[in-house]
Amino acid sequence: MRKTTKLMTGIVAALAISAGGVMAGGHLNKIGERQKAMKAVGGGIKVLVGIAKGQTAFDPDVVKKAALTIKANLNATKSLFPEGTGPDSGVKTRAKDEIWLDMEGFQTAMKTAIAAADNMAGVTEQSAFMPALGKVGAGCKACHEKYRAPKQ
Amino acid sequence: MKKKIAILVAALGIAGAVAFYFISGPNPLDETAISTQIASHKVDLKNGQILYNAGGCISCHRPAKGVKAQNLPSGGAVLKTPVGLFFPPNITPDEKTGIGRWSSLQFLNAMKRGLSPEGKHYFPAFPYTSYTHMSVGDLLDLQAYLNTLKPVDASENKKTSLFGEDLLRRGVGGWKWLGLQTNEFEPQPSQSAGWNRGAYLVTGPGHCSECHTPRNFLMVSDYSRILQGGPHPEGKGKVPSLVGLVKRKKFKDIEDLNSALRFGEIMGYEDISSGGMGEVQTNMSKLPDSDTRAIAEYILSFK
C-alpha cells in the first residue's frame, strides 16, 4: 500500500513537472540546458587555466580532452537560444537582448570561440599553448562582453 | 500688498539669476600659477601612454562603426546615458577637428576643470571629476602622447546635441560650484608605494569611482562610501562593490586580482567581461605589471 502511494505520488509529480514544462513553453528548458553546457565549458577552461598557471603540468592529452569538451558544449549551445528565452522570459538568465537583436553577430562570435577551442585541441607543443589559450579567452570574452549581462 | 510681494519675488528672481550667472560661469585654473609648472615640465611620452591606457580614453572616444582606424580616439561612437546621447569628440591631434592646436593650459583646463577652450562647461560624462585629481606633469605627458597619434579628420562625426544645451551647460557650472572637488591627489605616507600608486591610478586616470562609487544627492561621487558600488551609468542594473573582495571570496589575493586585471578571460576570469568591464580590462592589460599590481593592492585594502 505504502509503495503504491509512493509510486502514485511519483507519477503525479512527474506529470506535474512535465506539464509545467509544456505550459512554460517547453523551450524555456533551453535556458537550463545552455547554462549546463556553459558550466561544462567552464570546467574545460579551468583545466586549461590550471596548466597556464603552472598548477598542473602540460599534457597534450589533457589539453585535447578539455578543448574538445569546450568545443562540443559550445556547439551544443548554438541552438539553445530560441526566441523568447531572453531577459523577459521570466526565468533567471544573464543572456542579453543583444543576442536576439543581433543573432548573426552572436553566432559569428560563437563560431570564433568554437574555432579557438578546435585550435586548442590540436596543440601538442607547450610553446603553442599560451597563444592558443589567448585565442580561447578572447573568444569567451568577445561573447560575454556583448551578449551577457553582469551578475547582479 | 500684493504688489509688494510681486516686486519682492521679482527682485529675488533677478538676484537669483545674477547669482546663478556668476556661480555657473567658468572657473579656470590660475594661469600664472600653472604656467611655471608648464614651462619647467619635461615630457615623458612613455608615461603619457601609460596614462592613456589607464584612462581607457579609447573606450569612449572610439570612432563610429565603419570608420577604419578603430584604434584611434577620433570620437563619434555614441555613448548612451540617461541624460541623452553623447558623441565624444575627436582627441587625435587633427588641427581642425581634434585637439592638435590646444595649448597646455587649454588641455589642463579641460582635464582639471571640465572647461572647453571657449570656456564652456563639459558635461561630466567626460570624467574630469576624476582627472582633476591627476598631477599637472602627468596631464602634460598625456597631452604630449595624444599629440603623437595620427591625426584623424572627424568632420563627418555626429555631434552631441541636447535640448536646451547652453542652459544645461550653465547648469553644469552651478553643479561644479556645488560639488566638484578639484584637489590634486595626495599620497598617504603611512601606506606603501604600491598602495599609493594604485590609489592614484584608481582615483585619477582610471576614474574607477565614476561607476564603482555611489553618488550623493548632488550626483557627485560620495567618497565616504568609496568603491561600494553604484547604479550602472547606462541606467540598467548595478556596478559591483569592490569592497571586501577577498572576504567575499571573489579573489584570493593581490596576485589573483592582478591576474584578473591583466589577463581576464584568458586566465578564466569570466565575470570581468560583462557590463563594460571587459573593455576596461583590455585597456588595463596594456599597463605595466607593477601598475595593475598596485591597483590590486589598493583595491584589496578595502577589506
Image: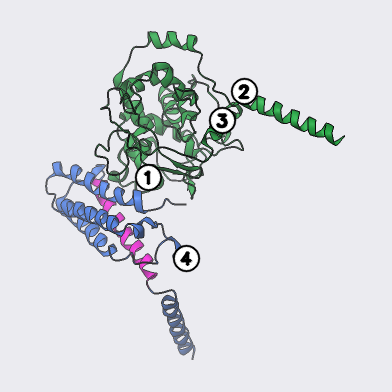
Q: Amino acid at mark 1?
A: Ile
| Stretch in magenta | A27-51
Q: Residue B170 has which mark? A: 3
Q: Residue B272 has which mark? A: 1
Camera-nearest residue between B242 and A50: B242
User: Is residue A145 visible in the rendered structure shown here?
Assistant: yes
Q: Is residue A95 above or below residue B269?
A: below
Using the numbered discs, state the Cα–Cα distance from disc 2 to disc 4 in whole angstroms. 52 Å
Q: Residue at x 38, y 37 (%)?
A: B60
Say if mark 2 contacts mark 1, CB within 8 Å. Answer: no
Chain identifier of the residue bearing label 1 in the image? B
User: Is residue B256 visible in the rendered structure shown here?
Assistant: no
Mark toward the viewer: 3 or 1:
3
Q: Mark 4: which secondary structure?
A: loop
Using the numbered discs, state the Cα–Cα distance from disc 2 to disc 1 in whole angstroms. 44 Å
Is residue B146 magenta-colored?
no
Chain identifier of the residue bearing label 3 in the image? B
Using the numbered discs, state the Cα–Cα distance from disc 1 to disc 4 in whole angstroms. 25 Å
Q: Residue A90 has which mark? A: 4
Say if mark 2 contacts mark 4, CB within 8 Å. Answer: no
In the rendered image, residue B104, in percent from the top left (x then y), is placed at 39, 17
In the rendered image, residue A123, in percent from the top left (x then y), is placed at 14, 49
Say if mark 3 contacts mark 2, CB within 8 Å. Answer: no
Mark toward the viewer: 2 or 4:
2
Dot 3, how many residues are within 10 Å of its Cα: few (below 14), some (14-19), or many (20+)? many
Q: Mark 3: which secondary structure?
A: helix
Residues marked 2 and 4, same chain? no
